Amino acid sequence: MSVRLKTVLFITAAYFLSGPAHAQPEMRLLEPNPVVQIAPLQAPLLTTQPEPRQDPIGALIEQQKAPPKPRLTATELIAGSEVQALATAPLGIGEQSAMILRLQVMLDRAHASPGVIDGYNGDNVAKAVAAVEAMLGLLADGVLDQQVWSTLTLTHPAPPLTTYTIKPEDVAGPFVPDMPKDYAEMAKLERLAYRDPLELLAEKFHMSEDLLRQLNPSANLSEAGTAIIVANVAGPASAKVVRLIADKGKRRLLGFDASGTLVVSYPATIGSSDLPSPVGTHLVRTIATDPEYWYRPKVNFQQGNNTQALRLAPGPNNPVGSAWIGLDKPTYGIHGTPSPNKIDKTNSHGCVRLTNWDVRELAKLVQPGVVVTFLEPDAGLPEPEVVGSIAKR
């Protein structure tokens, strides 16, 4: 698409959610603004002097290894996130943006989860933009234009950041400062709790720990009564989900209500080449919040030298996180994770892995019997047909 035809912020070109366009909500289309584009990664320009045996791949790797640009200050993030206009300055690779922070919060409030809110653009943001476009009945291409931005701003006008006073229960613990990685060591613990108040508060507001600390550089997060700046996320979705689609190629989980309306969307880690996720259609069989985890190396996989079955206690740092939605295929399900920043960036042992806050939300929206369809990558199948849905929160 020519940049002369439409003002766009290219979030990513890899994730498209196709399907018929439906009736759009009434809105006034704004005049195009100057184009905003995230700068693509390019190899350094060659010098005019001939240099034998150029290694463009090596140069590209060295560029990627360069130190990241300085992060924004708390003042810059807070002030910048209050700007309601769609920014026009290009966004470089690895560059933090107050506009992206605002966008992530609005997407989260629209129940199109961007995963961890951190102020950085990425694939999970693009998937959430595509989901919101589908909810609006627009062409879902994952590209943020003025129409999508304006609609999000109008339907989610609350400031993206807010003040929260730390409560006694936030710092009461118990905490596990040194969480072991070995399952045999983890099995000795009574609860796989948060490591500290920082981790608890970051999950509570769907944020990265780095962003929470960045916004509150001098705050004592371990003291009740401390006022801190956090993401102004909304309450969980309430629409009941009757059908789920686990899109393996685009690494997302879509939830539809009884009318076929897309009501929730989550970035997801879905299986791996060694332990692939299920195929075809399955049903939700069980739902458990704060579950214990049974490690069975003879059934699933073996971790290190652990050859015996082990019971791991409940808690957010349990291998399946804060909730388990079991399928009719034994040992497979949808669950949380102790590492929300790795969603869609690593593999799973065949299950569908979400952030803890996303799976807690979904566990309240589904019930046994809900249909879960696994959509294979490049299967040649039509994309799920969706109906627009977006509400003011």
Image (cartoon, grey):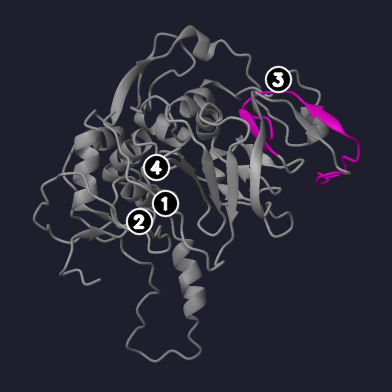
Neighbour tally class for label 1: few under 14, some 14-19, many 20 plus, Cα within 10 Å: many
Q: Which mark is residue 191?
A: 3
Q: Is residue 344 visible?
A: no
Magenta stretch: give its range: 299-327
Q: Up-down: is 263 above or below 95?
A: above
What residue does disc 4 label?
A: 261
What residue does disc 1 label?
A: 127
Write the residue at 52% across / 23% down. Answer: 200
Residue type pointed to by label 3 = Arg
**Horizontal arrangement in the rendering, residue 219 relative to residue 21 (left or right):** right
Write the residue at 65% across / 41% down. Answer: 283
Residue type pointed to by label 4 = Thr
Q: Earlier in the sequence, mark 3 or mark 4?
A: 3
**CA separation, marks 3 and 4?**
39 Å
What residue does disc 2 label?
A: 142
Please count the marks in the image.
4
